Image (cartoon, rainbow, N blue to C red):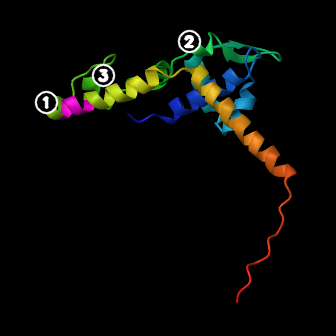
């Protein structure tokens, strides 16, 4: 599986929107935070809206926010909405099966099915809520380290004496 830039930016847009909680997240905030070209973000947000992950509202007070709880947004569904199958080859895809040359080998077909299963298992068990929580925990940990480091004075230690 290789995620496209649209899928990666889609995940990042959901992160930014999810962090706004119940507030409307402005398009410009997402553009500036992740350096996403405006026209490209527009396409991504349309896909996320069509897939039912976000709601949009026009106007000065508008923007985007999650259309359902972050705990109900499964990352596998986001990737599928943006890119299609999670499978490395279409012949092992559960949702998007199409014949492929690898079916000529039972061993390779089985290998790529195991790859698909591993990827799907991880993405299926991860929700946007998990991602938001992880991001928040890392930020808090980094903030504590930064603030703890500010209060300390570093004292130069004398060099050891040479005899």
**Residue designated by label 2:** 72
Is the residue 67 above or below the residue 101 in the image?
A: above
Q: Earlier in the sequence, mark 3 or mark 2?
A: 2
Return the disc, 3 or 1, that comes first in the chain's sequence. 3
Q: Nearer the viewer, residue 65 or 128?
A: 128
Q: Measure how far apart labels 3 and 1 are at the Cα level.
A: 15 Å
Q: Residue furthest bottom?
A: 163
Side (left or right) of 28 relative to 13: right
The region drawn magenta spans: 108-112
Instruction: Mark 2: give few (<14), some (14-19) or many (20+) Cα within 10 Å.
Output: few
Q: Position of residue 66 (x, y in %)?
A: 65, 15
Residues 102 and 136: in front is 136
Q: Which residue is mark 1?
A: 106
Using the image, tell me which numbered label, if any, was put on residue 93. 3
Label 3: state its secondary structure: loop
- On whether residue 63 falls in the magenta region, the answer is no
């Amino acid at each position: 599986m290789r995620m496209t830039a649209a899928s990666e930016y889609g995940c990042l847009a959901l992160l930014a929107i999810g962090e706004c909680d119940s507030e409307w997240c402005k398009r410009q905030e997402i553009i500036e935070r992740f350096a996403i070209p405006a026209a490209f973000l527009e396409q991504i947000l349309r896909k996320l809206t069509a897939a039912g992950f976000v709601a949009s509202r026009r106007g000065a007070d508008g923007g985007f926010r999650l259309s359902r709880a972050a705990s109900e947004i499964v990352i596998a569904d986001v990737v599928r909405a943006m890119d299609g199958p999670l499978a490395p080859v279409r012949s092992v895809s559960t949702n998007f099966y199409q014949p492929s040359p690898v079916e000529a080998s039972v061993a390779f077909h089985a290998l790529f099915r195991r790859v698909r299963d591993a990827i799907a298992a991880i993405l299926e068990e991860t929700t946007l809520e998990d991602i938001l929580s992880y991001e928040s925990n890392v930020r808090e940990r980094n903030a504590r380290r930064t603030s703890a480091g500010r209060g300390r004075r570093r004292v130069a230690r004398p060099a050891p004496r040479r005899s």
